[in-house]
Image: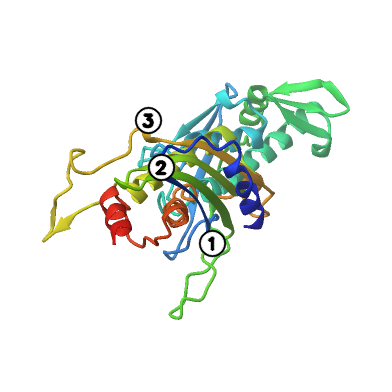
């Protein structure tokens, strides 16, 4: 947490834009820690994976994880490609056919990269071991002498002695009492459910984040202009930094909407804010300048050292906005959204 706070602390005030007459400026900070290795809210927090290497050197990952736009298809394919030593474009992901995909708890709790990623890695490691075993016979070398890269198995000391994966697969199929190159794995993290006293460790690891918000507020109208957001995140190892940064941008967009404009009104079971005419979502041109910083380490349990990230972009935003408004106006806001009407009423008291 301290590293995240240090990453946002100084930068938020650098090269501040000019302040218009009648406006006040505030800077606010907020931090969070959140589950980063699943969350055992059910008896199982597991996910299954099946990895298949075919006769043409292509890899299929059949995962229990669902793709809902969060980018899991890409990062899971990357994990398998890295484990097997194949180009990413050779990995096909099957994640929507319930007739063939294994079981998964669901998409929640920032768990997919960590849980489904570990399942995919474990299944791919079984295929890797089988590749090495069969190739060792073909190349007349010991398994420890072999390496895998770009779809080739080769002898480290003599890289010219090599076989394409497809040749190894065919050799495995056709040898006496042949072997298949299909492997299954199920990963359930080493965690525990909370007991009746709310004691227990629900996640295999935890992520930290800090955000700083600079905003201007028109004292006369209560209008808020968010100028800048700096967001620093402990992600373990960032497997796909560009996609991870995009995830944080999306979370900040959501968080600013929750903080400043979005209000769900339900009375007697009826939703009164059922359209964008009365449920105020911020637009692209309402977004501030956003800077994302990743504080990287290697998590011992995560796939290639990664932690889950999905929700950490949205969690601190509202608190940071409220703190920035208090810095600007000297008024504490404890209810969301902090609309211009509420700001105007607070400063007029």
Which part of the image, by quadrant, shows the C terminus?
bottom left
Please tell me which residue is depicted at 66% across the width and 53% down the height of the picture: 3
Q: Is residue 206 left or right of residue 279?
A: right
- Quarter occupied by residue 105: bottom left
Disc 3 target residue: 285
Disc 2 target residue: 66
Residue 138 pos. (x, y %): 76, 27
For mark 3, does the 10 Å Cα neighbourhood hold few (<14), some (14 to 19), or many (20 or more) residues? Answer: few
Which part of the image, by quadrant, shows the N terminus?
bottom right
Q: Is residue 156 left or right of residue 265?
A: right
How far apart are the alpha carbons under marks 3 and 2? Answer: 31 Å
How far apart are the alpha carbons under marks 3 and 1? Answer: 37 Å
Give above or below for 275 relative to 320: above
| Residue occupying the far right of the picture | 157
Query: Please, what secondary structure does the residue beneath circle 1 have?
Result: loop
- Quarter occupied by residue 11: top right
Q: Are marks 3 and 2 in contact (CB under 8 Å)?
A: no
Query: Please, what secondary structure does the residue beneath circle 3 have?
Result: helix
Disc 1 target residue: 203
């Amino acid at each position: 947490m301290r590293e995240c706070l240090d990453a946002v602390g100084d930068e938020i005030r650098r090269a501040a834009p000019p302040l218009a007459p009648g406006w006040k400026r505030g800077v606010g900070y907020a931090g969070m820690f959140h589950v980063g290795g699943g969350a055992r809210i059910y008896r199982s927090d597991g996910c299954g994976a099946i990895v298949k290497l075919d006769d043409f050197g292509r890899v299929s990952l059949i995962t229990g994880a669902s793709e809902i736009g969060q980018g899991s298809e890409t990062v899971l394919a990357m994990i398998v490609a890295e484990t097997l030593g194949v180009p990413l474009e050779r990995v096909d992901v099957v994640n929507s056919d319930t007739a063939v995909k294994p079981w998964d708890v669901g998409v929640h709790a920032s768990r997919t990269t960590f849980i489904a990623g570990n399942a995919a890695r474990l299944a791919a490691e079984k295929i890797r071991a089988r590749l090495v075993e069969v190739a060792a016979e073909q190349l007349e070398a010991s398994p420890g002498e072999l390496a895998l890269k770009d779809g080739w198995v080769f002898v480290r000391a003599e890289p010219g002695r090599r076989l394409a994966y497809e040749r190894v697969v065919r050799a495995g199929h056709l040898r006496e009492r042949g072997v298949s190159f299909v492997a299954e794995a199920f990963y359930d993290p080493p965690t525990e459910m909370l007991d009746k006293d709310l004691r227990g460790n629900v996640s295999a690891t935890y992520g930290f984040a800090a955000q700083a918000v600079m905003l201007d507020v028109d004292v006369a109208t209560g209008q808020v202009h968010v100028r800048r957001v700096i967001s620093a995140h402990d992600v373990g190892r960032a497997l796909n930094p560009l996609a991870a940064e995009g995830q944080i941008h999306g979370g900040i967009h959501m968080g600013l909407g929750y903080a400043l404009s979005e209000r769900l009104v339900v009375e007697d079971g009826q939703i009164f804010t059922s359209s964008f005419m009365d449920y105020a979502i911020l637009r692209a041109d309402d977004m501030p300048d956003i800077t994302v910083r990743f504080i990287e380490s290697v998590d011992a349990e995560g796939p290639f050292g990664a932690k889950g990230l999905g929700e950490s972009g949205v969690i601190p935003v509202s608190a940071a906005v409220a703190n920035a408004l208090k810095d600007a106006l000297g008024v504490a806001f404890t209810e969301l959204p902090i609309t211009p009407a509420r700001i105007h009423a607070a400063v007029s008291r």
